[in-house]
Image (cartoon, rainbow, N blue to C red):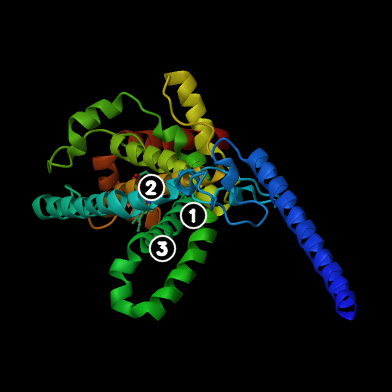
Amino acid sequence: MRNGCIGTKGGRLARHAVAALVLLLTVVAVTLGQSGASLAQQGTKEVPAAASPTHGMVPGNTLGTTSDSDFWRAVRQGADGKVSIPDKKAATLVQSEGELWRAVRNGPLALYASWALLAMIVILALFFAIRGRIRIEHGRSERTITRFVAVERFGHWLLATSFIILALTGLNVMYGRYVLLPIIGADAFGAVTAFGKYLHNYLAFAFMVGLVLIFLMWVRHNLPDRTDIKWILQAGGLFSKHLHPPAKKFNAGQKLIFWATVLVGLSISLSGWSLLFPYTTHFFGGTFEVMNSVFGTSLPTPLTVVQEQQLASLWHSIMSVLLICVIIGHIYIGSVGMEGAFDAMGSGEVDLNWAREHHSLWVEEVLARRKGAGAGATQAAE
Ligand code: HEM
């Protein structure tokens, strides 16, 4: 009886325990079923449904009815998930173009850019060895003529100093780890590069202001005209000591430098702006759209904000190296390459003989204007 009583009590306990277990298992099963169904609903076209990484679950299916490899392949190929945080970029787990960007930047871009810079320096060294310094053929007259007034020189030097520092700090980002790091060591390189980054970011604005100034001051002197043809046909007299093709304020070579500076400088500024204010611009997507509709190209549009950044970064480097090559040539001819040239941007006053040899039409213009002003002044005095 007692045993039976105990047995009855134990049996009831056991029955309750089994019922609780069944209930628990049912709840678990229903919950799992529901979450499976909701996972299936949430699955986008790109990500296999049952394996979507939502609800904090590890993706995959232990029963083997869905493929883990399909899931991860989709993720690897840039499939987007969903996020509820404001930063929607986080929905892309693997952005494959990033790898392409790195491969291009550290591979062909860095390689060909270094070749271009080296080639420019070698060409100038050869030119200097063969032609020597371009002298003032008739010697200095010791009479001068004003070439650039203070505001023009200010605009030029604002542009020039900012560009040189931007170029050096930019090249350090690209090549510093190979060139500077082994020489000055990791600590100094880290400090120099961090400081260089701030210089690069802030001096970008000085460069843009300089660019606008020289554009406004000099654009009217840089429009192409008939005198440029003769100058180009005679290669500017660069290869002959006695040839001085006529030119106005700027010759055809300088016009090329001017337009390269303005247009490539603008392109560097716009792509640099994208890098300064990440994820805010759509320059490439917009340009690709225009190109597709005008030229019938099939460039990818729309671009994600991350793709925009990657293209801006590559374009910024390519355009910068192009302009650095042009400016190396310009600095050469404006300093050691040609006697008397630096005075134009130094004091602003150039020797009359230098001016007659390189800008004869401009000298005539200035003298005629002076004569006219002199005659005007005499008439007014009378
Ligand atoms: C140490 C560096 C530099 C020196 C010695 C230098 C020298 C000169 C000189 C002497 C001129 C006047 C030429 C003339 O009288 O006809 C000039 C003009 C000019 N410079 Fe520079 N410059 C330097 C850097 C730069 C840089 C970095 C830029 C642009 C990023 C630049 C852009 C220009 C432009 C657009 C002109 C007018 C067009 C021309 O003459 O080629 N310069 N520079």
Residue in front for this viewpoint, 149 or 11: 11
> What residue sits right under mark 2 in the picture?
100
Tell me the amino acid under the disc marked 1. Answer: Phe
Indicate yes or no: mark 3 CB to ligand 1 under 8 Å: no
In the shown orientation, is residue 140 left or right of residue 175? left
- Give me the disc on residue 169: 3
Q: Mark 2, mark 1: which one is toward the viewer?
A: 2
Q: In terms of secondary structure, where does tag 1 sit?
A: helix
State the image coordinates of residue 133 (x, y, percent, origin top left). 17, 54
**Mark 3 vs mark 2: which is more N-terminal?**
2
> What residue sits right under mark 1 in the picture?
154
Tell me the amino acid under the disc marked 3. Answer: Thr
Q: Is residue 147 visible?
A: no
State the image coordinates of residue 300 (x, y, percent, origin top left). 47, 31
Residue 192 higher or lower than 43, as above or below: below
Q: CA distance from mark 3 to mark 1?
A: 22 Å
Q: In terms of secondary structure, where does tag 3 sit?
A: helix
Q: In terms of secondary structure, where does tag 2 sit?
A: helix
Q: CA distance from mark 3 to mark 2?
A: 24 Å
